[in-house]
Amino acid sequence: MGVIALVAVSSGLVPPPAAAGASVRRVTSTVTGSDGQPYRITNHLTRTAQAAERPGAPARQWLLVWTGDAAPGPDGKPDPDFLAVVDATPGSPDYGRVANTVTVDSVFGNEPHHMQYTWRKGDKVYAGGLLSDTVYVFDVSRLPRVSLSGVTLPHDTPCGSVPDAFTVLRDGTAYGSYMGGPDVAGPCTYSDGQTRVGNGFAGSPGEVVRLGADGRVLAEMPAAKKTAEDPVSCPNQPALPVPTCANPHGIALREDLNRLVTSDFVEVRHVVAGLVTDPNLQRRTVRTYDISDRNRPRLLSLSYLPDGPRVDDEYSREGLLAMEPAVTHQPRHKGAFVATGMGAVYYTPDMTKRELTWRQVFDDATAFRRIYPRDTPTSAADGGSWLMVSPDDRFLFHTVMFGGNNSPAVNAESGMVYVLDIRRLLAAGSRTSCRIDTIAETVRGGAEPDCPALVSALPIVDTTLGGPHWGAMDTFRPVAGGKHFRQTDQVSRVVTSNYFVAPTGLDGDARICMALVDPAGRLTEDRAFRDEHTGRRCVSFDRTSWPHGDTGKANPHGLLFAVADAQLR
């Protein structure tokens, strides 16, 4: 198993830290991995969780937060990572309270990263350990209690490493993006018999994996072409005989169109080591796959994001760091978006084509200018991250970590979440004319009539080296006098987490913040979502005590809204 030196991974059953309060109820769940060893999680159900489980208790909505321990305990031993279960029921007396921490007791130093982007009734939760190369499959059907359905170990995916994000199919299986190369440098053979040569753990090329609801690997498929990709745009260190940019980070699915989309981010081990010596190690490529055969995703299109009009240095060009794709949902639309860590949003009107052309349709500087008409932060290398289209295809949500290069110091630490109205852009179909191609458009929005319109931008200030990176949309509504919930296609809230990846030097202040979304898409801070210990707005994961013990600060990353199956109609 390949492991980045900054991360210590331990196997074997280790009891969770002592000293959780007497009112906490512990419930364990264990599965056997493909190595024949047991892997265990432990629920630490507080009085809030226990009350929610009582017969006849009001229905509750939960926020799942995939969380990493920030530092070893006083004895120098690692503390467990965990899935936090937070009461996210509007109007609840426990709103914002951590009701359960589900500790991962068998593997430490996972660097918990992303889960899937949305959750539906019956879905398992797929949660990746970025640096442990391990995926956990959680059963959340009985929330606030969680059980373990499966675990995907490093040797189960020998052709890929660094699992990043997941998207779940209607049958409950999932596709996952593995950003890094094979565990061992050299040739690796995938499920369909194809072979690619890789340069090792956290290198290139990455892959796409299909996982069963029990964590079993159903297919490993190459993200890289058989032939060389652009050798200038796609260097590898160490060099590969067939150059490739295949480092898939974000992943998005249109099952009705038989299309999967991934965006390539970076050859990740160089970022962790702080040694990005070539700007093109930051990728600008987007891949689409034909998934007509679900177990054999076939690479259909490889496209390159163009640079925009900003005059930035070679490491900060708009098309680099293709962090996240987002797809439309309604049958009449086929468009897709990509956001980069360099402050740009791109669009293509038809993801089903073999040859895709991407246009820049928005620059984060326009949203910054809405918040800060004076001392406006720049958007070059601003850490643009989470990106999602609302289920009704009206709005595009996007988080930005901080002001970009050369931002005025007074506002450089401000990140944000913003909302675009994309209806005119989608309605234009293949006739779209929107393109950000002048400096004026980068700060005022596109000049063409079909360009996305900025609806709202909400600042989120983080004085650390991180900021609002990830997010999730709430589409659940209470019904029947609060006894049940139903899922809709309208977004009522978005939640964001202030944490990136500490080993890169970009961490965050470890808060999760909630914003309300009105029917017009306008954002306002949810002032009722407060920390249970400090009473301050947003919920801080920089605290001493948790239901599982006094393990100190933790790093919240992946986010999902969910409801117990029995309470969802």
Image (spheres, rainbow, N blue to C red):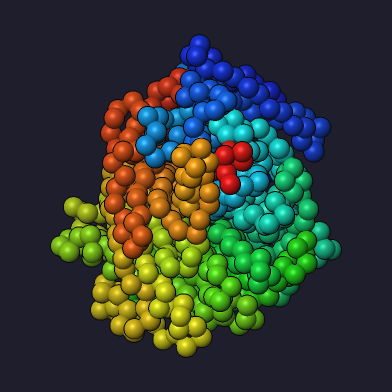
In this rendering, the answer to whether 532 lies above or below 397 is above
Lateral position of residue 172 relative to residue 273, left or right: right
Q: Who's the residue at 50% across and 83% down the image?
A: 429
In this rendering, the answer to whether 500 lies above or below 99 is below
Q: Quadrant of residue 98?
A: top left
Lateral position of residue 497 relative to residue 456, left or right: right
Rendering coords of residue 216 (x, y %) = 77, 46
Quick one: 36 or 371, which is closer to the camera? 371
Quick one: 434 or 265, which is closer to the camera? 434
- Asked whether the viewer can see residue 226, the reply is yes
Q: Who's the residue at 61% across and 53% down the image?
A: 166
In this rendering, the answer to whether 389 lies above or below 21 is below
Rendering coords of residue 91 (x, y %) = 37, 37
Residue at the right extreme, as displayed: 193
Quick one: 404 or 46, which is closer to the camera? 46
Rendering coords of residue 183 (x, y %) = 70, 49
Q: Who's the residue at 33% across and 63% down the image?
A: 520
Residue at the top extreme, as displayed: 22
Lateral position of residue 499 relative to residue 106, left or right: left
Q: Quadrant of the N terminus?
A: top right
Lateral position of residue 107 relative to residue 499, left or right: right
Residue at the bottom extreme, as displayed: 431
